[in-house]
Amino acid sequence: MSEPGSSTNGKLRFRDILYNNEQLGPFPTHLLKHVDKQTNRIIGPIERRDQRENVFGKSARGDYGKKIQQEFLRMTKRYPLGGALVDIQNHVNSIRANRIKTAHKKAPIPEDPRVLSRHIKCLGYFLGADIVSIGRLPQSAVYTHHLDGTPIEAPFKYAIVFACRKSEMTIRASNGWDQIIDPASFQAYQRVALQSEVAANYLRRLGWDAEPSNMKMPI
């Protein structure tokens, strides 16, 4: 008996995107070479860092002076479009307190790793991501705290990454100093925030623990 997606005379018998080799998304990322081990050399242990200790956290805290702190805290919201985008992203992030719990029983879906990965990637593209990837999550890649001081827990083995392009037309028309340059970034941040919240909610409904990693800015 043939598996779903198997071919007969060179043609797909069943056009099932979870089983066939059809390209997912607008970019042929499946053609990129993958290796089992990282190709860059890292010497010494890599420890998790507090997001408050990066340049954004220090700016918000006032480590670089009152003037930089003042300007950072109004960085994007000083523009009408930027403020509108930030307000909605903060609203999306506020879902955190009322997120649905993980279902007690896992949904009866195929457990084949290849089928599961294509399932998740299809979800990401359905939600509007431009590139979706899945990989192991080293704990060193996760901050210990958000900029607002909220602790970050990431007891997960894998990470699902959504990438969204900025508006090419907007970037081409911008000179880098006008009012659109910050909103051009935040329109992508907002889309990723919504996509990751929906995806995590969906996975929890299927019975898998999932936590979105959205940027929480103190602005």
Image (cartoon, rainbow, N blue to C red):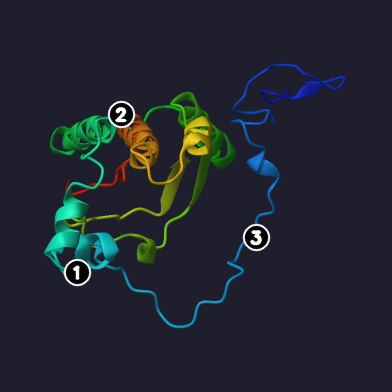
Which numbered dot is residue 144?
A: none
- Assess disc 3: are there few (<14), some (14-19) or many (≥20) residues with their C-alpha within 10 Å of its C-alpha: few
214 or 30: nearer the eye?
A: 214
Q: Residue furthest bottom?
A: 44
Tell me where residue 130 appears, x and y as whole percent: 52, 34
The quadrant of the rendering that contains the N terminus is: top right
Q: Secondary structure at mark 3?
A: loop
Please give the name of the residue rendered at 21% of the width and 37% of the height, measured from the top-left corner: 93
How much space separates mark 1 and mark 3, taking CA atoms?
42 Å
Of the residues shown, which amino acid type is indicated by label 3?
Val
* Mark in front: 1 vs 3: 1
Tell me where residue 156 appears, x and y as whole percent: 35, 53
Left or right, 86 with respect to 35, comes to left
- Assess disc 1: are there few (<14), some (14-19) or many (≥20) residues with their C-alpha within 10 Å of its C-alpha: few
Left or right, 110 with respect to 151, comes to right
How much space separates mark 1 and mark 2, taking CA atoms?
44 Å
Inspect this view and state whether residue 148 appears: no
Q: Secondary structure at mark 2?
A: helix
Dot 3 or dot 2, earlier in sequence = 3
Inspect this view and state whether residue 19 appears: yes
- Assess disc 2: are there few (<14), some (14-19) or many (≥20) residues with their C-alpha within 10 Å of its C-alpha: some
Which numbered dot is residue 205?
A: 2
* Mark in front: 1 vs 2: 1
Q: Which residue is mark 1?
A: 64
Of the residues shown, which amino acid type is indicated by label 2?
Arg
Left or right, 175 with respect to 64, comes to right
How much space separates mark 3 and mark 2, taking CA atoms?
33 Å
Tell me where residue 110 appears, x and y as whole percent: 51, 31
Please give the name of the residue rendered at 65% of the width and 55% of the height, measured from the top-left corner: 34
Q: Which residue is mark 3?
A: 35
Tell me where residue 185 appears, x and y as whole percent: 38, 41
**Pointer 3 and pointer 2: residues touching (CB < 8 Å)?**
no
